[in-house]
Image: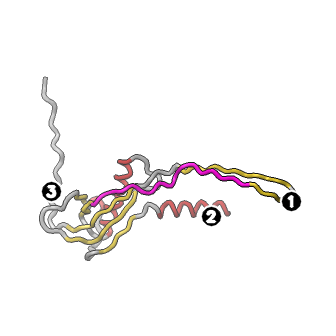
Amino acid sequence: MRVFRTVVLLATLALAGCASSHVLTGTPRAPIDPAQVRIYYGPPPGQYEEIAILNASSGALTYGDQNKIDSALQKLRREAAKLGANGVLFQGTADGHRDGGIRVGGGLGRGSGRWFSSAGVGVNVSPRPKYANGIAIWVPNPPPETAPQVTSPPQR
């Protein structure tokens, strides 16, 4: 039973570490589908309304820089969608604190007239999270998305 409680506690802490949050700066709207939320890397043309400041982090077990960024951006989209925002004005990313490495400990004590010793080695291989922040916005008439132009190679 004690092992089960420990596993549940660790799983809860891992999930809490990859959450997203927001601070309202405007008026939220009805929730929308996260697929309708667009990431803007600069202010969109025309008017837009700020709804909230968003913060998110990559998953607890996400490896690879691109996967970490994709995970954090997806969480920004989901958080914005909950607030009814159809855009996120991307503000940037940062690396999380790394608390890994090898830890070595030991001890020596006396009990019941006998000497005993113990030593332990622990290794933390969890990746460093990536944090992303942005501003949830509502764009009344979002510009059409432009697909990258694909040109075929010259014929020989």
Give the label, 2 or 1, closer to the camera. 1
Query: Label 3's element?
Result: loop
Viewer-proximal residue, 73 or 94?
Answer: 94
Toward the top, the furthest residue is: 156
**Which residue is labeled 1 in the image?**
112
**Which residue is labeled 3 in the image?**
144
From this view, report whether residue 42 is shown above or below residue 127: below
Query: Is mark 2 in CB contact (under 8 Å) with mark 1?
Result: no
Q: Main secondary structure of the magenta part?
A: strand
- Residue 95 pos. (x, y %): 39, 55
Q: CA distance from mark 3 to mark 1?
A: 78 Å
| Neighbourhood count class around disc 2 (C-alpha, 10 Å): few under 14, some 14–19, many 20 upward | few
**Which residue is labeled 2 in the image?**
5
- Residue 124 pos. (x, y %): 55, 51
Give the quadrant of the N terminus.
bottom right
- Residue 69 pos. (x, y %): 35, 52
Q: Is residue 144 magenta?
A: no
Q: Amino acid at mark 2?
A: Arg
Give the quadrant of the C terminus.
top left
Highlighted range, magenta: 91-107
Upstream in sequence: badge 3 or badge 2: 2
Q: CA distance from mark 3 to mark 2?
A: 51 Å
Q: What's the residue at 17%, 40% (across, down)?
A: 150
- Quadrant of residue 109 within the rendered picture: bottom right
Query: Label 2's element?
Result: helix
Q: Is residue 40 left or right of residue 111?
A: left
Q: What's the residue at 65%, 53% (across, down)?
A: 105
Q: Is residue 5 left or right of residue 58?
A: right
Query: Is mark 3 in CB contact (under 8 Å) with mark 1?
Result: no
Q: Amino acid at mark 1?
A: Ser
| Neighbourhood count class around disc 1 (C-alpha, 10 Å): few under 14, some 14–19, many 20 upward | few
